[in-house]
Image: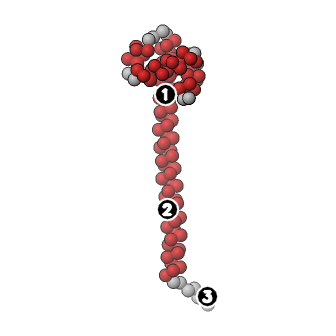
Amino acid sequence: MLYTQFNMDDALEVRYEEGVEDGIEQGMERGIEQGIEQGIRQGMERGERHLLVHLVCGKLQMGEAPEKIAEDLLTDREEIDRICRAYEECGPEEAAVLARLEE
């Protein structure tokens, strides 16, 4: 017959190890969830920035003034001015304007 000796120290050690494993698993799940949420938020912000640059560049190509662009797009004038300066430095290529803004 096989006898197994079980004591409180062994039980506590096993429970501790299980707790650590559970904690790591929960931490990874939370970290992944937070990472996904942050990635979605950053992606949306980047998409909004790209759209704004696209619209501003189009309006500048049509000869509209920054004041009118800001009014039409309901956007902060300072942000429009930043995009206009990048446009003047880089030309009408939206990718170049975006790259300048991200510097």
Residue 35 shown left or right of residue 74 in the figure: right
- Mark 3 crowd level (few <14, some 14–19, many ≥20, 10 Å Cα): few
Residue 32: which disc?
A: none
Lower sequence index among marks 3 and 2 = 3
- Work out whether residue 55 can be spotted: no
Residue that badge 2 annotates: 23
- Work out whether residue 37 can be spotted: yes
- Mark 2 crowd level (few <14, some 14–19, many ≥20, 10 Å Cα): few
- Quarter assignment of residue 72: top left
**62 vs 1: above or below:** above
Three-letter residue code for mark 3: Leu
Whole-percent x, y for residue 80 in the image: 45, 20
Task: Please name the residue shown 40% across and 13% down the image.
Answer: 68
Measured Cα–Cα span from mark 3 to mark 1: 70 Å
Measured Cα–Cα span from mark 3 to mark 2: 34 Å
Residue that badge 3 annotates: 2
Q: Nearer the viewer, residue 99 or 35?
A: 99
Name the secondary structure under disc 1. Answer: helix
Task: Please name the residue shown 52% across and 59% down the image.
Answer: 25
- Mark 1 crowd level (few <14, some 14–19, many ≥20, 10 Å Cα): some
Residue that badge 1 annotates: 49
**41 vs 62: above or below:** below
Three-letter residue code for mark 1: Arg
Callouts 1 and 2 close, C-beta under 8 Å? no
